[in-house]
Image: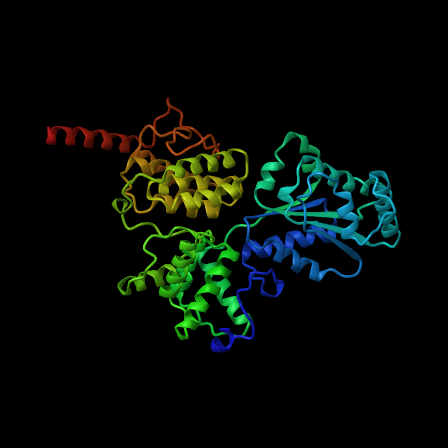
Amino acid sequence: MYQTFYGLREKPFSLFPDHRFLYLNRRYQLALSLLEFGVLNKNGMILLTGDPGAGKTTLIQKILNTLDGTVLVGTLPFTQDSEHSLLPWVLKAFGLHATSQHTADLFHVFVDFLTKTAQEQRGLLLVVDEAQNLDVAKLEELRLLFNLNDRHGSVLQILLAGHTQLRERLQDPQLGAFVQRIGTDFSLEPFSRDDTKAYILHRVQAVGGPASLFSDAACALVYRCTQGNPRLINQLCETSLLYGFSEQVRSISDALVADAAKDRLEGGLLPLSQVDELSVHPESRSATEQGSSEQDFPQAHSSSSAREAVNPPADTHRHWDAAMKLKEQGWYLEAIRSLKQIAEHPTFHRQGWFQVGQCYLALGRPADANEAFHVALGDTSHRSKESAPIHYAIGQVLESLGRDEEATRYYDLARFTDLDLTGTDNPFSHSHPRPSSPKPDPHRFSQFWWMNTIRRWWSKLQHSFFR
């Protein structure tokens, strides 16, 4: 309908997975490389998780498209048959037929097929999509099939793709043996603001469209509404193109995206984020366009008063508790995703980004942790006591990076603003160990004596002056 009007060869934002449109940012490129390594090197089972619409199927398509005839691929797209064994579906995935439906006969058919494949020096790859629907019994079936490699060498590979609930399922103690056989594990994250803009541009140009089809402000608003989910981006951009075509405008503005988003939200079917004041006023357009260049870490707010505490939605506290539980259980990427969304609420901005930084530290990503801590810090006065633990955390990160001089400056700031601060006394902490740092000897002459003296002197002066 709109393709000819905008000079496009085909629809750029189809809802169906198509590896031709795959956009590889740093994280998705890493995911592709790890999955390819897992498939080609037969390094145990492979686990790929992500939110619905994160691009799992598209990534898998890309990998399968690169395989040659030495690897036979079978796909299980349907995993909700809870009453029967998975074995008939596995045989069907590889085009195998059995004369009997007894489990033993089905098993022997698959073993014979595996033996023949090994003799031909070929491999098998079983792709299980929507794996979050598999119960413990079905996952155990897959483990038993994978164990057949002990007889024939590394012939069978199993790739599990599913929603993030799959990781919760795998925490079941009954699945300990299954988890030990996972050699490659990756979780997809939503796009950042910059990646959302680059993703839109990539898909538009892939079908011959102009780079200016979506304005910077439009891309920024798409990110706000979709939170970087690729499938939701596709749906909102597709609707925006239809609206633009109906109004015969050559470029998609943020106002068009706002209209499309509001109509989809009113329909109640598309899970877009509830963005306040979707209507974009002319005077705010420049600010919106500036915001489109922000990365995954937002700019610090202009002042702490701009984030006055208001009563957050009732479910925000519940989401916070859930995110903290993910963090405690070691699901750091999932916790980061939840915490970033929670931190959009002013009440949770500081502590949310502080916990994001702690998660990045646990993942061994100090540079990202440092950025998150700075976002949490904002422009809070260095004399604010609530900024002390953040200064202290930044000092720890810088020290781990070997930037001792900068680290000392942040340690000084932390101790100057809170004389009682220690490595564990932290109002933002939540049962998560931080990198250890040497504790000062109380019997040793402190190098911060002059700070303590000034603080106490200033406190007494204020007390006397304002009494």
Q: Position of residue 120 (x, y in %)?
A: 87, 55
Quadrant assignment for the C terminus: top left
Query: Where does the image place residue 257, in percent across and percent down from the top left?
Result: 40, 63
Q: Is residue 401 visible?
A: no
Counting the numbered discs, the total is 0
Question: Which quadrant of the structure image shows residue 111?
Answer: top right
Whether residue 162 is situated above or below residue 212 in the rendered picture: above
Above or below for 189 versus 250 = above
- Pick whichever, 334 or 221, lies toward us: 221
Name which residue lies at 46% across and 64% down.
239
- The single residue placed furthest to the top in the displayed view is 443
Choose top left, top right, bottom left or bottom right for residue 55. Answer: bottom right
Q: Residue at x 25, y 45 (%)?
A: 305
Residue 415 vs residue 159, the one in the foreground: 159
Coordinates of residue 165 in the picture (x, y in percent):
57, 41
Q: Is residue 238 visible?
A: yes
| Residue 462 in the figure: left or right of residue 89 | left
- How is colour applied across the structure in the image? rainbow
Point out residue 294 in the picture as x, y percentages from the top left corner: 40, 57
Residue 312 or residue 309, whichever sits in front: 312
